[in-house]
C-alpha cells in the first residue's frame, strides 16, 4: 500500500500542496483533478522528484520520500513509472535512443511492451526523430509508450491528455492502464475534468478533487453516488470556493 501523509509544499508564499493525505491500494486506478498544478506536484512528490516542506510518503512500511529527505533509496528505483511530456524523455534524443537508455538503466525494462504500446497508439511513428522536434500529440504518445515499458508497481501519469487531440488515443491509453491495474499495479492519473467526464468516465472508481493545493474530496461516484459525474464536479467546485 502507498500512503501519502500530510504532505505540503510552498511556492513563494502560496501553498501548492496543502496537507494532502490519501492511500492507494494495489490494483486501484485513481484520478486527481481540480487544481491546474496541484495534482501534478503531488504526483512528483510521491517518488521524491519534488521535495516537500512537511509530511512523508510511505510504501508498505518504509518512508521513501518526505521532508528532509534529499536522497532517494536505490531500493525503490523502478517501483514507480512517472510519465509526463517533460520528465520522461531525453529532450534532444529520439524515441529509439530513449528506449535503449531506459533498457540499459533499468534491469527489468520491457522494451517490447514499450514498442507494442507505441504501435497500438501511433502506427508508423517516426522513432528516429528527436523528441524536441515532435508535435505535442506525438511527444505525449512517446512519453506514454516509454513509461509503459517500466516493470513498475505504480504508474504515475501526469496530465499528458491535454496534448492529445484524438479522443480514441486517450481511450487506448486508459485501456492500457486498465490492463496494468488488472495485473495488480496501482495507477494515479492527473486528468482534466473535460477528459474525466469524457474518455475517462468508466475507468476511475476514485477521484481526488483538489483546490488551492488542498484535497477537497475523495469520492467514488460510479459506485456510491447516484449522480452524473458532471454534477458531482460542479458540487465539489462550490464546496471548494
Image (spheres, grey):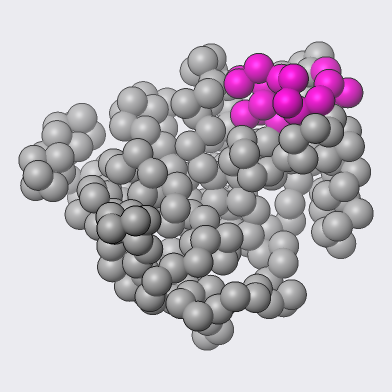
Judge whether residue 164 is colored magenta. Answer: no
In this rendering, position of residue 240 left or right of residue 94: left
In this rendering, position of residue 23 left or right of residue 64: left
**Residue 142 point in image, percent of width and height:** 71, 30
Q: Is residue 63 above or below residue 170?
A: below
Q: Nearer the viewer, residue 209 or 180?
A: 209
Q: Nearer the viewer, residue 92 or 20?
A: 92
Q: Which residue does the image show at 54% across and 44% down from the upper left?
A: 157
What residue span does the magenta drawing correspond to?
A: 126-142
Q: Quadrant of residue 133?
A: top right
**Residue 205 point in image, percent of width and height:** 35, 48
Q: Quadrant of residue 130?
A: top right
The quarter of the image holding the C terminus is: top left
Q: Nearer the viewer, residue 225 or 150?
A: 150
**Residue 20 point in image, percent of width and height:** 31, 64
Q: Is residue 16 visible?
A: yes
Q: Is residue 122 above or below residue 186?
A: above
Q: Is residue 174 above or below residue 207?
A: above
Amino acid at each position: 500500500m502507498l500512503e501519502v501523509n500530510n504532505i505540503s509544499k510552498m511556492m513563494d508564499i502560496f501553498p501548492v500542496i496543502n496537507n494532502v493525505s490519501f492511500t492507494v491500494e494495489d490494483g486501484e486506478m485513481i484520478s486527481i483533478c481540480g487544481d491546474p498544478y496541484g495534482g501534478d506536484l503531488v504526483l512528483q512528490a510521491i517518488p521524491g522528484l519534488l521535495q516537500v516542506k512537511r509530511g512523508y510518503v510511505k510504501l508498505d512500511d518504509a518512508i521513501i520520500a518526505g521532508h528532509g529527505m534529499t536522497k532517494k533509496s536505490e531500493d525503490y528505483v523502478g517501483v514507480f513509472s512517472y510519465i509526463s511530456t517533460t520528465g520522461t524523455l531525453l529532450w534532444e534524443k529520439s524515441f529509439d535512443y530513449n528506449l535503449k537508455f531506459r533498457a540499459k538503466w533499468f534491469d527489468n525494462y520491457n522494451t517490447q511492451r514499450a514498442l507494442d504500446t507505441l504501435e497500438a497508439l501511433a502506427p508508423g511513428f517516426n522513432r528516429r526523430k528527436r523528441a524536441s522536434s515532435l508535435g505535442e500529440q506525438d511527444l505525449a504518445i512517446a512519453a506514454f509508450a516509454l513509461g509503459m515499458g517500466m516493470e513498475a508497481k505504480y504508474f504515475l501519469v501526469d496530465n499528458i491528455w491535454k496534448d492529445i487531440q484524438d479522443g480514441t488515443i486517450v481511450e487506448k491509453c486508459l485501456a492500457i492502464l486498465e490492463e496494468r491495474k488488472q495485473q495488480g499495479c496501482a495507477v494515479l492519473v492527473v486528468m482534466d475534468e473535460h477528459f474525466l467526464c469524457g474518455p475517462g468516465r468508466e475507468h476511475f472508481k476514485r477521484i481526488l478533487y483538489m483546490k488551492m493545493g488542498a484535497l477537497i474530496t475523495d469520492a467514488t461516484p460510479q459506485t456510491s453516488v447516484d449522480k452524473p459525474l458532471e454534477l458531482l464536479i460542479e458540487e465539489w467546485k462550490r464546496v471548494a470556493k
